[in-house]
Every structure is written in structure tokens, then in C-alpha cells.
Image (cartoon, helix red, strand yellow):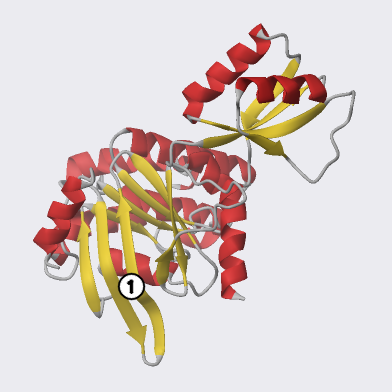
């Protein structure tokens, strides 16, 4: 399949290759080790896509290929409409890359690090300096702007690495374990920033082992195992972001009243853990709904039906449950 064919196929499936990522059958070996054995992936503009898989599944290798730092042995890749191998400069000009460990020149200040990368991208001096000030404020490093990078903590260096990835205002962001070393407040800031960048129409691909945070920010998920794209086992209600269906944890003062109403309404529900249904008392269940609109309708109808609801919120752990099916496969 040519790059043009991949682009045409993606266009037919609704993916905008000019601004997104399309990967078809990518392979990459390191000697006898087959790191990528046929990866297919699409990450769409305006969405945060989670890249999930066990250690050794090929996530970092794939991100390095997308960043143009590794040449694939086979397959086709399009990043923001460009092949990172045959059109490397054009692809890199539209791609922001943040590795899992951001090395710095310790003798340079945070501002000088960003200025060096801005100059490497040949950005105009005056606008780039204003953008650097904005980015330092965004990642809460303004007070450290003119201090040597050697005084920065690991978390602060991670935030500087994120600013570096954004210095040239890229359309595509590739982030490998971006939350590593961040404190809780910085993790919240990161989630909000990535969500805002996606809402602006950018393509954001994030690899992380902090699955609860990925689930909170991501729209889609791609799973890797043994160097291949895989579909997790969904036989136990595992869902991933972007599939239209969501699992909500619904709790009421009377569990029997809740389950009786759900049965009468024909709603798909299941226990949140092994249980024997009580005859009285509070409790909760997991309910499958059709996105946020379905959840709103469920809450409205349940209240109208006299169910004493206490809470209804997205159930955490869908990505984690999907990940565990990959772990079972790996073992």
C-alpha cells in the first residue's frame, strides 16, 4: 500500500490525514527482536488518543518512528500529511515530540533551552520570544526561566520538555509518559492542557502507564501487545474511549428500587463486583449508556421514576481492565 493509498483509505474512514496520524502495517526489528510486527493506528485531529500496552509492547518504538527518529523496516506512516522518512523536515515541522526522559543542557537556563529549539526550527525571533514567555507561564516555570536547568527537579524538567515540544506550535503531539515525575497539581494541569490542545483541533497521541489519568483525558484508545495492534477482550464489559458507549457507576439509596427500575426500562446493567442482591439498603451498579447524552437521559428518567439516586459518574478503570486482558495474553 502506498502513502497515497493509506491516505485515501483513511479519508474514506473519516480520518483527516492532513492533520492526523495514519499507520499501516509498520514493522521494526532490532536484530532478532521484532519490536513492531505490524502496527495499524489512526489518531484523529481534535482528539486525545491513548496508546496503551505492557512494557515491551512497542509503544516507545512506534513513537520514535512517528517522530522520525527511527526508520521503519516496512509499512506506511503519515504524520500531519507527511511521511517522516521521505519528508522528514516537513513532518517534524508539524510534530511536537516529548520523550519519556527529557535531557537538558544543565548550564543553560530554561528560557535558553526553549530559545535554542525555537532557533533550530528557524522561528522568527520576536514572535518566538513572546511564545516562549507564554509557554513558561503555561507550564508554571516563569520563576525558573532564568535559572540553570541543573536546579530543576525531575518534574520541572518534564514540564520544560512539554514546553519544548510546543515551542513551534505543532499540529501533532507525541507524548511518551508525559506525567512521569509530576506532582498531583501538575498532573491536573497536564490533563487540562492536553484537553485544550485537542479541542483546538490538534492530534494528541499519549503513551502512559497511569491509566486512570489517560482515561480521564482520552477520546480514543489504541492497544499494543507484542508489537501488534490488538483489540482487548470486551466480554466483561470493557470499553474504551471513543467507542460511543460508556460505563457509568450509578448509586441509589435503595439498590432494589434501582435495579427494578433498570430492568423495567430495559437498561443494560451489571454488578460492580460479585454480589448477592440485597432486599433493602443502598448500593450501586454499572450501567452501559450511549455517551453523555445517554447518561443524562438515564438520570432524568430514573429521578422521574422515583428512584432515590445518590450519584452517577463515569466508571473508572475501563482502560485498566482492557490492559489486564493484554497482560493475560502476554503471560
Q: Position of residue 269 (x, y in %)?
A: 65, 34
Q: Quadrant of residue 210?
A: bottom right
- In the image, is residue 29 above or below residue 259? below
Residue placed most toward the observer, 37 or 111: 37
The residue under label 1 is 38
In the image, 21 versus 134, the foreground residue is 21
Q: Which of these two is toward me, 278 or 223?
A: 278
In the image, taking residue 225 as reference, residue 267 lies left or right, namely: right
Q: Give the crowd class for mark 1: few <14, some 14-19, many >=20 residues within 10 Å.
A: some
74 or 117: nearer the eye? 74
Residue 137, percent from left and from top: 42, 37
Position above or below: 176 against 240:
below
Which residue is pictured at 32% across the width and 48% down the height?
A: 166
Q: Quadrant of residue 21?
A: bottom left
Q: Is residue 81 visible?
A: no
Quarter placement of the N terminus = bottom left
Residue 257 in percent (x, y) is at: 78, 19
Query: In the rendered image, is residue 61 in sight?
Result: yes
State the residue at coordinates (30%, 54%): 42
Q: Position of residue 91 (x, y in %)?
A: 18, 59
Amino acid at each position: 500500500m502506498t502513502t497515497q493509498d493509506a491516505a485515501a483509505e483513511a479519508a474514506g474512514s473519516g480520518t483527516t490525514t492532513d492533520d492526523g496520524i495514519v499507520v499501516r502495517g509498520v514493522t521494526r526489528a532490532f536484530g532478532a527482536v521484532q519490536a513492531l510486527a505490524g502496527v495499524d493506528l489512526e489518531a484523529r485531529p481534535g482528539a486525545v488518543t491513548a496508546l496503551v500496552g505492557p512494557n515491551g509492547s512497542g509503544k516507545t518504538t512506534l513513537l520514535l518512528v512517528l517522530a522520525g527518529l527511527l526508520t521503519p523496516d516496512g509499512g506506511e506512516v503519515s504524520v500531519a500529511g507527511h511521511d517522516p522518512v521521505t519528508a522528514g523536515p516537513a513532518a517534524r515541522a508539524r510534530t511536537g515530540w516529548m520523550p519519556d526522559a527529557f535531557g537538558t543542557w544543565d548550564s543553560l537556563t530554561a528560557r535558553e533551552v526553549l530559545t535554542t529549539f525555537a532557533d533550530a526550527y528557524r522561528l522568527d525571533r520576536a514572535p518566538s520570544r513572546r511564545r516562549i514567555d507564554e509557554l513558561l507561564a503555561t507550564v508554571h516555570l516563569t520563576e525558573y526561566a532564568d535559572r540553570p536547568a541543573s536546579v530543576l527537579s525531575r518534574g520541572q524538567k518534564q514540564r520544560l520538555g512539554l514546553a519544548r515540544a510546543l515551542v513551534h506550535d505543532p499540529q501533532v503531539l507525541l507524548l511518551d509518559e508525559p506525567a512521569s515525575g509530576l506532582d498531583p497539581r501538575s498532573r491536573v494541569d497536564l490533563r487540562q492542557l492536553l484537553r485544550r490542545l485537542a479541542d483546538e483541533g490538534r492530534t494528541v497521541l499519549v503513551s502512559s502507564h497511569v491509566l486512570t489519568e489517560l482515561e480521564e483525558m482520552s477520546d480514543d484508545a489504541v492497544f499494543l501487545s507484542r508489537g501488534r495492534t490488538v483489540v482487548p477482550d470486551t466480554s466483561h464489559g470493557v470499553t474504551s474511549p471513543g467507542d460511543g458507549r460508556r460505563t457509568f457507576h450509578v448509586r441509589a439509596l435503595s439498590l432494589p428500587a434501582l435495579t427494578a427500575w433498570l430492568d423495567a426500562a430495559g437498561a443494560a446493567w451489571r454488578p460492580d463486583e460479585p454480589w448477592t442482591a440485597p432486599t433493602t439498603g443502598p448500593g450501586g451498579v454499572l450501567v452501559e449508556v450511549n455517551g453523555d447524552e445517554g447518561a443524562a437521559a438515564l438520570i432524568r428518567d430514573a429521578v422521574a421514576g422515583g428512584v432515590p439516586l445518590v450519584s452517577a459518574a463515569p466508571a473508572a478503570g475501563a482502560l485498566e481492565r482492557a490492559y489486564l486482558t493484554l497482560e493475560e495474553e502476554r503471560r
